[in-house]
Image (cartoon, rainbow, N blue to C red):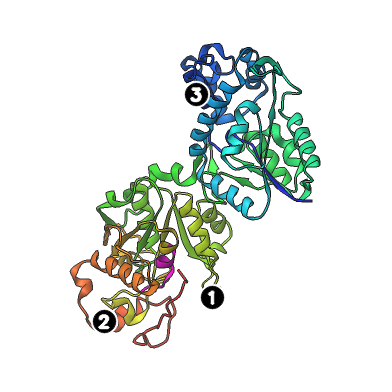
Amino acid sequence: MTTAAIFDLDRTLIDESSTPIFMRHLAEAGIGSDSSIPFAEPLVHATSSLLKTIFNVMGESRILMQPAKLAVRASVGWSVGDVDTAARKAAAEIVDHLLPFAKLVIEEHRAAGDLLVLASTSPLAFTRPLAEALGFDGVIGTAWGRTDDEHSRYTGTIDGVFVWGPAKADAVREWAAEHGVRLSDSSAYSDSYYDAPLLDLVGHPVAVNPDARLQALAAVKGWPVRHLDKSTGVIKVAGREIQEWARPIMRPELIAPYADIVFQHDDKIPADGPAIVVFNHRSYFDPTVMGLLLARAGRNVRGLGKKEVFDVPLVGRLLEGIGGVRVERASGSDEPLEAAARALRGGELVMMAPEGTIPRGPAFFDPELKGRWGAAKLAADTRVPVIPVGLWGTENVWPRNQRLPNLSPRTRPVVTAVVGDPVDLKYRSPDADTKRIMAALGDLLPPESRIRRQPTTEELLRTFPPGYSGDPNAEVLRRPGTDT
């Protein structure tokens, strides 16, 4: 026996109802119209935009599904061939509307050898061409009655049952039995509480963008919750990420009134699409400045962070909930870079410090910045732009030898964050591209950073953790590698 991955369509693989797209293509083909199709009106017609909003936000309900059940009546007399042609055009558009991580999940199941199944309440007349366009192995949906002749037309009736709720689960069970699929080892993805019977069938249920009742049920049953427009683990509240809710207060005067933070060229942060944002590491205050910068740019970010931070109770879960990627430097694992690459392939923005950690001792004052290979390897793997951000003065807000930042508003150290143009990488050598990245960062720092000088003992001690008692003049050597 084999296994399968079973996907609902609306609010699961795409973020809203597919009905308006199908209806528009039918109308353009001269088949019916928005006003003559019962379930097009509550979803498409401008006067019923409230119902469309309710569906997109809240998901399915018994009331909203009644027009869908009656929609078959409008199909009487429609040419099966003409509907199929229109549905194929709609399918091509819907494929382009797939959520970014839906594409990745589908490909992962395909690579694992799972059969791919589209299970939707929508008519098979619409979803079968879509399943074919996606390269799926099976499709389950509501069948419309049709005449059995050379000019086949729909009869305005349902052939069998309306595939919704428990009936959808029954249809999946029957399909699995016919195709030798072991549901106990299979996966299913849906947004709707009414698909709980389907999710109960499989060994690996996933609540995707769940409505309120499915969210509660998933918590009770221990089902994982995913949002296929975001990286795994990212939490959404009322349809928005925590970062998006927090953005209005992500302002320097509110978050860091004890520092004078100056941003330059922040419009060079891409407004959308994947990118790797790199910064030079000088202080524990750096992530705060970078968070403020990216909030100004209106971008959510996935940041790589130390294992030790993720191990802190509550803090670690919060970091995961906003898309943080845990890094265990001593492990030598490529898993953090793989997680970051996945985020980039989903169209997200990843932030990282190529140095990996704050330089200690004389290395902190070296005009030539040195980094590890992680950012260069990630860029070569994904071919997304690498945007450098030069930070300066953060160590005056929170030097490494202090457990807390300087919160005195009277001193207000000046901090600068300068965004540069994408780094010109060659993708032939991680070492050479790392040097290009670090040189680009160095070029964004003030002239004083390029002056080679002998720091004082007091300056050197500020670059070490509290309680350091060794020789501050002994430079800590860093071995290049994938650690980020």
Percent from the top left, x then y, of residue 237?
Answer: 54, 40
Q: Depth check: 369 or 38 in front?
A: 38
Say if the magenta span includes residue 375.
Answer: yes
- Residue at 37% x, 70% y is 428
**Residue at numbered disc 2:** 455
Give the SS element for disc 1: helix
Residue 104 horizontal side relative to residue 406, left or right: right
Q: Secondary structure at mark 2?
A: loop
Residue at 18 percent across and 69 percent down: it is 447
Magenta stretch, residue numbers: 371-378
Tag 1 residue: 330
Quadrant of the frame with the C terminus: bottom left
Residue 171, percent across and down? 76, 33
Q: What secondary structure is the magenta-colored segment mainly?
A: helix
- At numbered mark 3, what does the secondary structure look like: helix, strand or loop? helix
The disc, 2 or 1, on the residue closer to the chain's N-terminal end is 1
